[in-house]
DNA sequence: ATGGCAATGTTTCATTGA
């Protein structure tokens, strides 16, 4: 099974690129973030014509997530949000695809350390941890894929000195991210040898992509059982090179 | 110390993102 995650930064704008990418990369499941669209305007028909079903938790303007699965893989028991965590922001959609419980997440940005949004980000991560702990008991084959908005280590940051203490790398955020590993999850990307300076997001400004001035904030976390089945994990930079790209690149994991 | 770029809404700029 090929599992991918991609923050598309608007499904409406990126649909042609997404359809091209699905045809080229042939993933079995894709977690999408920042679709910025409510369910009625989600391009369900176009994706079905491409062979994918979708579970959606949509929202206008901001956030919004979707989980795509090929017709062969199936899409069962879809559930939106974090149970018991009241949140108007649509950031989580989970479903079972080909026997794997897939949780698609768009973690909060946090805006600035110490801000209200930062406090919300930390509260949100604590709620996610509780949810995933319960899900792991029910689903030994579990993957959590998405935009975590945390660069876990300095090697995931193009300029750690410039970013020190900033949102996405601050110690409390990194602790919140590492707490997910404490549940027994593994960062699929780090199960394998990787090129130095591997990133998944580059600012639209300052020619950041050409300078490879990025962060690795999009990840696929896998349970111990899935880690044993994981054969590869990589970042596909090709869509970031296109005209009018998302600022994020897809991350892809191969599961036996 | 700040903007830079992009998407959205119902817009003529504000908000958010990372």
Image (cartoon, coloured by chain):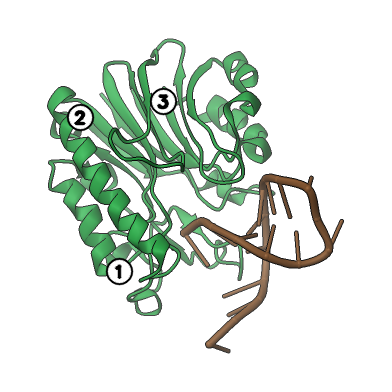
The colour assigned to chain A within the rendered structure: green
Mark 2 and mark 3 in contact (Cβ < 8 Å)? Answer: no
Question: Which residue lies under the disc numbered 2?
Answer: A135
Asked which quadrant contains residue A79, the reply is top left
Residue A192 can be seen in this image: no
Q: Position of residue A195 (x, y in %)?
A: 34, 56
**Residue appearing at x 55%, y 45% in the figure:** A238
Image quarter (top left, top right, bottom left or bottom right) of the C terminus of chain A: top left
Task: Please tell me whether residue A231 is drawn above or below residue A47 in the rendered image.
Answer: below
Distance from disc 3 to disc 2, alpha carbons, whole Å, reads 19 Å
Q: Secondary structure at mark 1?
A: loop
Q: Position of residue A15 (x, y in %)?
A: 64, 33
Distance from disc 1 to disc 2, alpha carbons, whole Å, reads 27 Å
Mark 3 packing: few (<14 Cα in 10 Å), some, or many (20+)?
A: many
Asked which quadrant contains residue A210, the reply is bottom right
Question: Which residue lies under the disc numbered 1?
Answer: A170
Tell me if B3 is positioned left or right of A143 in this view: right
Mark seen at residue A29: 3
Mark 2 packing: few (<14 Cα in 10 Å), some, or many (20+)?
A: some
**Residue appearing at x 62%, y 14% in the figure:** A49
Question: Which chain is disc 3 placed on?
Answer: A
On whether disc 3 and disc 2 are found on a single subunit, the reply is yes
Q: Secondary structure at mark 2?
A: helix
């Amino acid at each position: 099974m090929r599992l991918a995650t991609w923050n598309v930064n608007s499904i409406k704008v990126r649909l042609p690129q997404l359809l091209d990418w699905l045809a080229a990369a042939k993933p079995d499941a894709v977690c999408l973030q920042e679709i910025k669209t409510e369910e009625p305007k989600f391009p369900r028909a176009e994706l079905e014509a491409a062979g994918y079903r979708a579970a959606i938790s949509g929202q206008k303007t901001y956030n919004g997530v979707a989980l795509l699965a090929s017709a062969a893989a199936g899409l069962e028991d879809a559930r939106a949000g974090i149970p018991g965590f009241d949140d108007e922001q649509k950031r989580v959609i989970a479903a079972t695809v080909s026997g794997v419980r897939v949780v698609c997440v768009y973690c909060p940005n946090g805006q600035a350390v110490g801000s209200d949004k930062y406090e919300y980000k930390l509260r949100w991560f604590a709620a996610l941890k509780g949810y995933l702990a319960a899900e792991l008991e029910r689903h030994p084959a579990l993957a959590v894929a998405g935009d975590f908005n945390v660069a876990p280590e300095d090697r995931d940051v193009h300029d750690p000195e410039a970013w020190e203490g900033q949102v996405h790398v601050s110690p409390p955020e990194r602790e919140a991210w590492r707490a997910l590993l404490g549940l027994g999850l593994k960062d699929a990307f780090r199960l394998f040898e990787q090129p130095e300076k591997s990133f998944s997001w580059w600012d639209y400004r300052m020619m950041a992509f050409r300078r490879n001035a990025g962060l690795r904030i999009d990840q696929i976390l896998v349970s111990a059982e899935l880690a044993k089945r994981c054969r590869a994990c990589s970042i596909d930079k090709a869509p970031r090179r296109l005209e009018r790209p998302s600022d994020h690149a897809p991350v892809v994991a191969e599961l036996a």
